Amino acid sequence: SIPENKLKDRKFYELFNEVWLHSEYDKTILTKERGCRPSNLKTFGFARNQKMLEDYRYSEKIKAKNSITDKKIILYAPTSDRNNDDYKKSIFSITNIKFYEQMVKTLLNSDIILLIKAHLNDQISQDIKSLIKASENIKFQDELNLTNDYESLVISDVLITDYSTIYVDYLLLEKPIFLINNPNPFPRKWVMSSILKNVQLPKISDLSDFENLFENLKYQKLETKNIKKLKN
């Protein structure tokens, strides 16, 4: 999300001789939405995404290293809760133990792993960690033996997110993406970036949508028809 005070943003970016960006779309956001001057904005690509694409060919080796070769993996990577109570208490919040209790029941005896990629600013309670320790179907990313943060994207079969731009990186892999109906955790004075507005991807609104996703994943029936369009 974008702070309302665009003048402050512009002055910050003008402190640098060059600001390196990974796409022309980023440049458009900075100039059109944040009021930055384009003179020092340079597009160079993004090394992290290049590494992710290179690692994609080794996805089965990464899964084998973690003993999950025969599993279908759903990566759930929500944005930070920003200490927003409505967000933290919502039905799909990764800090809400009721969410995990439901997922444990739903995924029992399946070959699906729900892999949780928590935002670096969020804390998971010990009660939640104790609950899922006994589950074969729910794991946190930091439990896995991964070389870098983005190997979780590489090994997953589908991404679920909400107000996170991680979906933009995931588009490069051309795998299914779902947006979950979580409350908006950002302060009211912030203006949402266009990259997070009206994204044309399938939605998850309730637990039945989650269950349908699990069922369709078993039979490889998840839609990707809009992925290439958004990627380009």
Image (tube, helix red, strand yellow):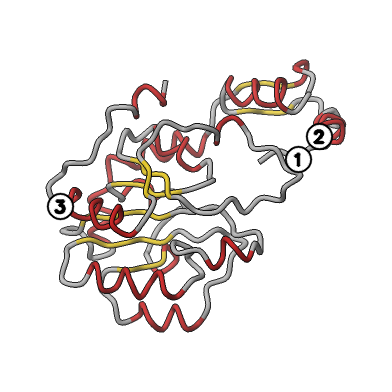
Nearest the eye: 229 or 58: 229
Which residue is at 54% across, 26% downward? 45
Residue 193 vs residue 199: left or right?
Answer: right
User: Please, what is the three-letter code of the amino acid marked with disc 2?
Assistant: Asp
Closer to the chain start, of discs 3 and 1, is 1
Mark 2 falls on what kind of element?
helix
Q: Is residue 78 above or below residue 44?
A: below
How far across and down, in percent of the image, does residue 46 sit? 54, 32
Q: Which mark is residue 9?
A: 2
Q: Residues within 10 Å of mark 3 (few under 14, many from 20)?
A: few
Residue 169 vs residue 209: left or right?
Answer: right
Label 3 vs label 1: CA separation? Answer: 41 Å
Mark 1 falls on what kind of element?
loop
Nearest the eye: 225 or 41: 225
Nearest the eye: 57 or 29: 29
Q: Residues within 10 Å of mark 1 (few under 14, many from 20)?
A: some
Q: Which mark is residue 218?
A: 3
How far across and down, in percent of the image, does residue 43 sit? 62, 21
Closer to the chain start, of discs 1 and 2, is 1
Q: Residues within 10 Å of mark 2 (few under 14, many from 20)?
A: some
User: Please, what is the three-letter code of the amino acid marked with disc 3?
Assistant: Lys
Mark 3 or 2, closer to the camera: 3
Label 3 vs label 2: CA separation? Answer: 46 Å
Q: Are marks 1 and 2 in contact (CB under 8 Å)?
A: yes
Residue pointed to by mark 1? 3
